[in-house]
Image: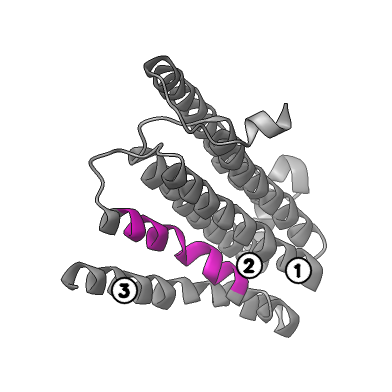
Amino acid sequence: MLRKLFAGNKEMTEAMKERGFKQMIRVITIIDVLYALLIFQVFTLMPRPEVDGFTREELTEVLSQSYLNYLGVFVGLVLILLYWGQSNVQYGNMDRTDGRHSVLSILQVFFLMLYLYFVRLDLEFESPVLTQQMQSITLALSGFFSVWGWHHAIKNELISKSLTSLERDQVYLKLMPEPITAILTIPFASIGPNYWTFSWLLLIPVSWILKKIRENMKTK
């Protein structure tokens, strides 16, 4: 059964294509719901009076002492939105999906959920090295599952036939900034929590470099 799930379809009938399209719609719906839950979970990480037990008189102190929490929440929200954008880029260029691609897509979101789990541990245990490293690792895995999914989509002709070979290759580059940055941030966790948090700004130069590569591909 698993062998059939992960085996590509070499001969596609019209009925199989139609099923693949309907399956893609269902998968997209599931993924959007999961991303909505992830965004909601991000906001539950913020200090709350009913959970953390502080009063109105202590609000100023809590806000000043929890600035790293808010920064972590902001970074988490930005990263989740970027990964959601990855999903949109991929499915926006596809005609249908299959069993394997659907599994890879769900695994991408699964590792984002694991990322939020380690964010919560990070906040509760005051930024231990391991929890920050695991945040980077889970984000990297989520991104690479997205790249794997796109590779599978190309190999099994799930993508739109209107895409050129150049556009297919450019999608790879659009999916790469986040997982590459996640890998680069891993050693910063050993230096200190603040260094690790601000190391995510590496996403800016990484994205710029990959954008320049895409632009150079157009001129060749």
Q: Nearer the viewer, residue 19 or 130?
A: 19
Q: Nearer the viewer, residue 181 or 129?
A: 181
Circle 2/circle 1 CB separation < 8 Å = yes
Q: Nearer the viewer, residue 23 or 75?
A: 23
Q: Is residue 61 visible?
A: no
Q: Which residue is mark 3?
A: 213
Residue 164 percent location from the top left of the image: 24, 51
Q: What is the distance, in whole Å, between disc 1 and disc 3 at their CAs?
A: 36 Å
Q: What is the distance, in whole Å, between disc 2 and disc 3 at their CAs?
A: 34 Å
Residue 70's image quarter?
Answer: bottom right
Residue range corresponding to the magenta coloring: 168-183
Residue 181 included in the magenta stretch of the image = yes
Q: What is the distance, in whole Å, between disc 2 and disc 1 at their CAs?
A: 10 Å
Q: Residues within 10 Å of mark 1 (few under 14, many from 20)?
A: many
Q: Type of residue at label 1?
A: Ser
Q: Residue furthest bottom?
A: 191
Q: Which residue is mark 1?
A: 127
Residue 115 percent location from the top left of the image: 67, 53
Residue 184's image quarter?
Answer: bottom right
Residue 166 percent location from the top left of the image: 27, 59
Q: Earlier in the sequence, mark 2 or mark 1?
A: 2
- Image quadrant containing the C terminus: bottom left
Q: Type of residue at label 3?
A: Ile
Q: Which mark lies nearer to you, 2 or 3?
A: 3
User: Residue at the spot x=36%, y=39% of the render?
Assistant: 159
Q: Secondary structure at mark 2?
A: helix
Q: Which residue is mark 2?
A: 68
Vertical placement of residue 109 versus 26, above or below: below
- Image quadrant containing the N terminus: top right
